[in-house]
Image (cartoon, rainbow, N blue to C red):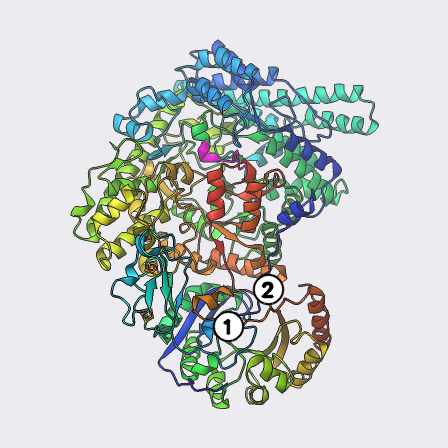
Amino acid sequence: MSNQHVSTRAPTGLVLNIQHFCTHDGPGIRTTVFLKGCSLRCKWCSNPESIHLKPELAYNPRKCIGEKECGFCLKDVCPESALYAVGSGDRPDDKVRVNWDLCTNCGRCVPVCPTHALTLFGQEMTVDQVLEEVEQDGSFYRESGGGMTVSGGECLLQADFLAALLAEAHRRGINTAIETASNVPWDFMAKVLPHVDTVLHDIKLTDPERHKRWCGADNTRIRANLKRAYETFPDTKFIARTPVIPGVNDDEEHIRATLAFIKPYKNVIDYELLPYHRFGEGKYEFLGAVYEMQDFTSPSPETLKRLREIIDEAFGRPTQAR
Amino acid sequence: MNMATETAQLLSAQEQAIVDGKKVLHGTATDRVLRMFDAIRSYGPPRVALERAVYFTESFKTSEGQPLVLRWAKALKHIAENISVAIFDDELIVGRPNTWFGRYTLVFPELDGSIMKAGAEAFIAAKGAPDAVTVTEEDKKIIDEVLFPYWNGKDFTPNFVKALPPESRHMNFGSDPENIGIKQTFVIVNTSTMRHSQNWVIDFGKMLTRGCKGMREEAQARLAALEHPRDLAFKGPFYEAAIIACDALSLFAKRYSELAGQMAARTKDARRKMELEEIAAICAWVPENPARTFREAIQSQWFTQLFSRLEEMVGGDINSGRMDQYFYPTYKRDLEEGRITPEEAQELFQCLWLNVMQCIQSQMSPALAKGREGFSHHETVTIGGQTPEGLDATNELSYVLLESTRPLPCSYPELGVRIHANTPDKFLHAVAEVIKDGKGSPKLLNDEFMVPWFMSNGIVMKEALDYAISGCSESRLPNRETHKTGNSGINYGAVMEMTLRDGRMKIHNDELFGLKTGDPRTFKTYDDFWNAFKMQLENVIRHCMIQVYTAVALKPRYIAAPLASLLHDLAMEHGRDLHTHGDYIPGGLDAACIDGLGGFATCIDSLAAVKHLIYDTKKLTWDQLLDALEKNWEGKEAIRQMCLNAPKYGNGIEWVDAIGYEIQRFVMEYAHNHPKPHGQSFNMRIIPITFHNPCGKVTMATPNGRPAGEFLSDGIVPSHGCDTKGPTVTLQSIARATCHIYKEHREDLLNMKMAPANVAGEEGTRRLMQLIRAWSSQKHAHIQFNILNKQSLLDAQKNPEKYRDLVVRVAGYCAYFVDLSPSQQAEIIARTEEQMG
Ligand code: SF4
Ligand code: SF4
């Protein structure tokens, strides 16, 4: 996948969401900042809103109360006339529709909508604005050894902003982590990693061809980046992760190959399996997009157990009940 | 990247047990305990137990004119001599005020005999409703022919209503002169007509170590030492009453000893024979004498507790105090000398819980019973915390107690854990595991809030460290606190409505209850609106305080409590019944409370919506908003949506949270500037019980987008479903809205609901522990969790039979979900399920 929208965004970043009290994104109680924009196109992605590095209008028709009750967005708001109601007045469905071909994602209709049926994915925020929100959780980090995790999309695409954000977080005493698929130019990693305490990075597939087929790009650059990162930042903790998807990567070979890849490095402290769980299909609809989304299932507990045993054995620890 | 988290629905232990049809949620319970539990659950709705009231009345007829405390003690003795005694199969810890094995509710005609007839009729009419108390024809006859005729006009409630200044009476009871207490307006709420005493903790440890004998001897010695004629006149009767009360309690136990002996002689079952003989021996010894063994200690505690229930209705109940402390000496000795195992101790605790479980509190008016839905009672057992020496107080028995509450699907005892900075991880881990069972238990109180609070009210640290949890979220020093009067409550929703409607309440035919603060259309700035709100609020607080002063002044003529008093150091020292606390008892902490009964967040959000929509962004005019409110949003959905989506408390928005702080500060300041005599504080706290439901019923639509009649926000927490950023931000917002700087700020109630998936596994337990630690260092007073799936609650509404045993956290107490009214059920479902990523 091309990196045409890669830019060096500073001092503001395009933030998708800030989620508090996250439980799967690193040590302790964490706040996760999701940055918008991604450099892969995984077929199982259930967060289409995180893909493009630009703000996008989302419309949830279930929240719209219709032209008669409201109709605020229809009153000379949209410069492109992208909004219209199908039926009007007393017709049963007088909900608003979006003509996605006309919409330029300018966001002007968002503040007039009282129901939040119209919202904008992606908000330009400064480092200070992000940290102000993140620091709401400050006292919880103290108790739990937690901190801030930046995720995406691919957070490394906004490398300058990310580096500034993480550096400032460190200055404020906040533990930092990132979640990345590492499919970015090495420079981006080199810029960001000095400010990261824990890197949670995906290893989705082993075979380059299959990686390309499932994720839209092969994994040569990813593997090179990771090796170089392990070596360049010996004091940084790395945790490898695989989202386990039946039929894609739920096989022992992938697990063993990943173990072989990470095991030489002492600073890769763990390898986690995250069972795929399908949710969020509705978001495609909100973006007015039809994505062919294949039917992926969740891995069975037995499969997970079997695969986790391999990992636990490699790390020389008893298998934990999960 | 955030695609692959494990969010599949997980069940709490409680939900799992229901799905699997298991009787035991966690751990084991003996067959004996399970049999008794089943028998109690199968008995059906609670029934009124009238014997106490009948004998109390009989005695009062013969003692007219004598000092009240003496009459009370004589009545207790008369009850002890005559009330039926009954021991049922399997029982190990005996004593009851009723004659069936199942739930019962005592009635107290001296409190509300005048409205009892109407109350009984209302309960009979409501038969079959989830929260109706059974009143049989026979019961009704006794109420009509024995209780009502004697007490009509002689009881506390109507005399209190009549004693109120007209304006206060109107605000609380409306304009109907016939209403002598059966109906409240819910513009403000009083609770002194619902109970003799506010929630209370008696010093059970004293009874265990000294026995009735020791207490009687002290009273005799003090009586003999009286010399001054004034003391002989006033203190003499008190000590005499104390002696009689000790005799009464002992006598009651002796009758059980005799009964057990007779039953032992008759039974063919060799094993039961031995058990009955042991019961006979134990009841012959305690509570007259100090308890020598753990089992004697439990039996003695139960007799004392039960007798205290016969003495008075303590709303929020006779709390059990620091059980892991006062039971520990006998437990330790028994353990060391091989007389008991932890498993046996657990069974005895469970026998005690089953006894407690049967005793329901109800008001004799279904309207008033609404404030305490699900037959609320919360005899809180305190564990953990610190010793008077400032060390961590947990011991082996704390763990036994904790475990004893896990197997049965019941909400008793109401367990409260004291948390402090040095609570050991091991104990906190055990506590978090129990919270995860999903029964809403235990609730947590924070020493880091409580101890400084007591100290700022003049208590030395050593003593402050020994507090016991009481009622919903309060705490008591059993030998120091004296304020034994029911508090009054603010309906914050009504305050908002009166601000919007120039002092009038729509539901009460537009009658004027509040001040005339003007038509909001004339308010030029947000500050004008805020000032009108403050004036209404101040007026309401004023009337709440008037109510409390009126009750305090009146009570000594209607209510006494010799047993509670003789177990209180100061009352005993000064020869004073605790109910005379209105005339300061020297050395006492006489701290009254006014409760915010719901709608705190409703008000914050309404004020914020007005500020945001009308004054800051000018998206709405007052005309539009008031019109939409009057129409209860009918045809005004867009305006309602604007209100619903205006900035809300609980999301880390500083200016919104600050409104909460300003409300609290204003309230505290008023209380601070109007102290009680002797510098004692009038405390303000926010705690709903379930009053946010009836308070919501009388409140019109509010600018936060809430429709008329819907429940108000609960406790100190954000409005239902409006805090969307997870528990950490919610707690942070609450901390910011809390005004700690006055000694008048007492415990606020904090409910949090989470899906079990969020705290699954060992990792989840740790996170819950961390959340609790952070809560403690943020100096919140109280927290309790409902860890259940919303789906289970929805299922339970559809299949009440299957979910008969589903326990949920309601307010400061837990209850069976199916015992709650549909609107209270809806309220619980609507509480935000805190999400974790
Ligand atoms: S985002 Fe801009 S272009 Fe798109 S519908 Fe809204 S107003 Fe029109
Ligand atoms: S403003 Fe929002 S709610 Fe109103 S019609 Fe438009 S989309 Fe629907």
Label 1 packing within 10 angstroms: few (<14), some (14-19), many (20+): few
Q: In terms of image quadrants, where is residue B298? A: top right
Name the amino acid, label 1. Tyr
Residue, disc 1: A291
Q: Secondary structure at mark 1?
A: loop
Name the amino acid, label 2. Glu
Depth check, mark 2 against mark 1: the one in front is: 1
The secondary structure that most of the magenta stretch takes on is loop
- Residue at image coords 52%, 35%: B374
Q: Quick check: B529 left or right of B235?
A: left
Q: Do discs 2 and 1 belong to a common subunit?
A: no
- Residue at image coords 59%, 86%: A219
From what the image shows, is residue B151 above or below residue A234? above
- Residue at image coords 26%, 38%: B539
Residues rendered magenta in the picture? B370-379
Q: CA distance from mark 2 to mark 1?
A: 24 Å
Q: Position of residue B608 (x, y in %)?
A: 30, 54
Q: Quick check: A63 left or right of A229?
A: left
From what the image shows, is residue B648 above or below residue B170? below
Q: In terms of image quadrants, where is residue B336? A: top right
**To which chain does the residue with label 1 belong?**
A
Any part of residue A24 in sight: yes
Q: Nearer the viewer, residue A253 or A96?
A: A96
Q: Quick check: A28 left or right of B293?
A: left
> Tag on residue B6?
2
Q: Nearer the viewer, residue B753 or A252?
A: A252
From what the image shows, is residue A322 above or below residue B754? below
